Image (spheres, rainbow, N blue to C red):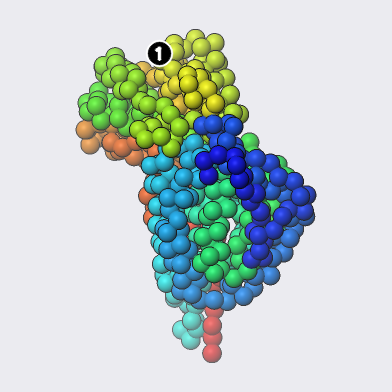
Amino acid sequence: MSGNDQIRTYNNYVAGEWIVSASGNTNPSLNPANKHHVVGNVQMSVGADVDQAVAAAKKAQESWKRLSGAARGEYLYKAANVMESRLNEIAETMTREMGKTFPEAKGETARGIAILRYYAGEGMRKVGDVIPSTDSEALMFTTRAPLGVVAVIAPWNFPVAIPIWKMAPALVYGNSVVLKPAFETSVTAVKVVECLAEAGFPAGVINLVTGSGSVIGQALAEHPDVKGITFTGSNEVGKRVGQTALARGIKYQLEMGGKNPILIADDADLDLAVEATISGGIRSTGQKCTATSRVIVMRQVYEPFKEKLLAKISQLTVADGMESGAWLGPCASEKQMNTVLEYVRVGIEEGAQLLCGGTRLEEGNLANGYFVAPAVFDGVTSRMRIAQEEIFGPVLTLIPAESLEEAVQLANDVDYGLSASIYTTNIGRMLTFIREMDAGLIRINAETAGVELQAPFGGVKQSSSHSREQGQAAIEFFTDVKTIFVKG
């Protein structure tokens, strides 16, 4: 939809039906590249809607869990095929609703399709082990049982990939799902669930409830029939979700913030390191939990690296993500833009030197959106807020280091530990970095952002609840182990 002539209202999906929320209220989801463009009107659900969705999920899960893993996997295969046929439509919706460029949105949607197919295959993989018993006449083995109803609370920055990498394993292991997407990307979430519905999932196995996170997310966390919660979002909200789940004695999985470093050693290929820093830190407008935020550069190459970095950043094209040639889109919302601009102000106040960017772009059509020029700070010390707190925007902080040892110390000097990378040609330095770096994802001669779908993903320290998502690691969260002892 390119204008507001026919604004569609999107409903909740509960028990196999698209229904209006109990409140009857909707709010518009706006295009961050053009705040005058309404992508769609979205249901503002209340607690009664959560109750209805959870009840439907609980009822459906009883028969869903009795299907074979292979049979459940077939539904995921079908959903992947449906999504593939609608790839461009979903990607365009994502770009218009969240702001990332259309090529990035297509890539993310393709990743969602690949995740569905990967977990479809999980239905045919082993779910236990035979364990020797001390009783020679007994058989002892393990198997796995689904949790039951799983609440999926997803963020706005990856509105296709993250919900799918949570829902797909939950479903193939026999759970039913209630999805609560971020309000900012609710229309994109509807498009995803439409694909699952078209694939023929039994009514109630998948449910979608949109609205305010403080209302819907809290209601899901507190609901007595929700047996597991998987959350991606801010530390503040994640800790509340975790505390609520802990008090109820249910499983919870939190993937939260990052303040991810890239280390540039004095033997690094500076051109490659600059490309990785810009791609990891500024692509997607810096709105990735794995985005590069701190650029720790050894003193010997600090100035030439900085010069190359600024030259490359000056060439980036900031525009509506649907425009051909757009490299960088807007912040996802006015609130997020204001957060980024506030951190730029804080950085200047703290004494860092703003080398470029950090201002709202308002020329021509950009005035209608939430565009910020990519910012680079020099003269940053590790104790500054801009070096400690997650900004979630196109802001890089340059920090010099006299040695690799100091660089690693600086890299670890934050509360987060999600991803980290180093650029070096020295094997010894690579191994030191792997050994000493406190992060769940370590990348050598690659940007901090990005993880392959078949590999475990998650952080340490304040970045996560120390569980892992994606790959075969997902079975650890979405199932419970049963130990079976059989004697004739």
Q: Position of residue 55 (x, y in %)?
A: 72, 64
Q: Is residue 52 left or right of residue 230?
A: right
Observer-nearest of 282 and 347? 282
Q: Quadrant of the C terminus?
A: bottom right
Q: Secondary structure at mark 1?
A: strand
Residue shown at 65% from the left, 46% from the top: 42
Q: Is residue 323 left or right of residue 425?
A: right
What is the residue that sits farthest to the front in this orientation? Answer: 5
Numbered marks: total: 1
Occupied quadrant, residue 419: top left
100 or 215, which lies in front? 100
Image point 45% across, 56% down: which residue? 86
Q: Residues within 10 Å of mark 1 (few under 14, many from 20)?
A: few
Q: Which residue shows up at 59% across the image and 70% down it?
A: 202
- Seen in the picture, residue 455 relative to 423 is either above or below; the reply is below
Instruction: Evaluate whether residue 416 shows in this view.
Output: no
Query: Quick check: 488 above or below 153?
Result: below
What percent of the width, then of the height, locates residue 276?
A: 32, 32
Task: Give the percent coordinates (x, y) of residue 418.
Answer: 46, 39
Q: Nearer the viewer, residue 216 or 302?
A: 216
Image side of residue 442 versus residue 42, left or right: left
At horizontal 35% and vertical 29% (from top left) the residue drawn is: 277
Residue 366 image point, x, y percent: 49, 24
Per the image, the residue denoted by label 1 is: 355
Residue 78 appears anywhere in the view: yes
